[in-house]
Every structure is written in structure tokens, then in C-alpha cells.
Amino acid sequence: MATIEVTEDTFEQTVTGEGIVLVDAWASWCGPCRQFAPTYEKVSETHSDAVFAKLDTEANQSLTAALEIQSIPTLMIFRDGIMVFREAGTMPAPALDDLVNQVKGLDMEDVRRQIAEQQGSAEA
């Protein structure tokens, strides 16, 4: 599967659905972003069951600020509407492929339980 572009208008709808969505926050002037792009595209072709999205931080500055993106590239991974990974920087294709497989293997019931416990202790 090829990558798709997300914008301020399509981001929420894209990441809140069922399944796995990766989001690469990038900018055209960013050297590391340009270096990571072919790796991201290559890995997207081996995981047709996941959505690989790209967020142009320059064209979507309000969303970039709302997501508190401080450095690029930043990779975010959502599963079933929950952000399960976020990290700035690049990674080689084998590491990204492994990361996608780890997200596929997550027990989402356990993730939801942990989130509920954290929210409960934060409110106490």
C-alpha cells in the first residue's frame, strides 16, 4: 500500500478508526525527513493491513502544534484510535518493520485497561 496524505481536515478521522495507522510528520526542508521517506514507503508496501499516512507539518501548522510535535520526523502509531507509539527521529527499514509487527501483536484489551488505570490514578 502506498502512503496517503493527512491534513488538519482528515487526521482525526484517519487515526480514530479501527486498525493500525502510522503517521510520519515531516517537512520538505528536513533532510532526515527526506532520508526516511523511502524507508517509510518501502515498509508500507509490506504491510497492506496498515495505513501509512504522511503529515506535512508546514502545511498543517495548527495540527502540528496541537500534537505538540517539537522535532521532525516524528513517527506516531495508532491502533484502534489509541496512540501506542510516538518517537522523533528515523529508523532503518528492519526496525520499522519490527515495530509494525509489535503493534500488530498488542493485546488491545490490556492497553485499554492500562489506560483506564492510569486515568484513575491521575484523578485520585
Image (cartoon, helix red, strand yellow):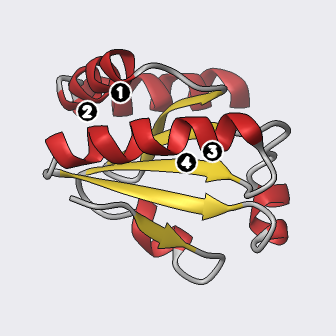
Marker disc for residue 111: 1
Q: Is residue 73 left or right of residue 2?
A: right
Q: Is residue 78 left or right of residue 6?
A: left
* Residue 122 in sight in this render: yes
Question: Can you identify the residue that label 4 sits on?
Answer: 24
Query: Which tag, 4 or 1, sits closer to the chain's start?
Result: 4
Residue 48 versus residue 121 in the image, above or below: below
Q: How many marks?
A: 4
In front: label 3 or label 1:
3
Q: Give yes or no for contact between labels 1 and 2 (Cβ–Cβ under 8 Å).
A: yes
- In the image, what residue type sits under mark 1? Val
Marker disc for residue 108: 2
Examine the image and state in which quarter residue 55 appears. Answer: bottom right
Query: Which tag, 2 or 3, sits closer to the chain's start?
Result: 3
- Residue 109 % position (x, y): 24, 31
- Residue 77 % position (x, y): 45, 40
Marker disc for residue 34: 3
Q: CA distance from mark 4 to mark 2?
A: 22 Å
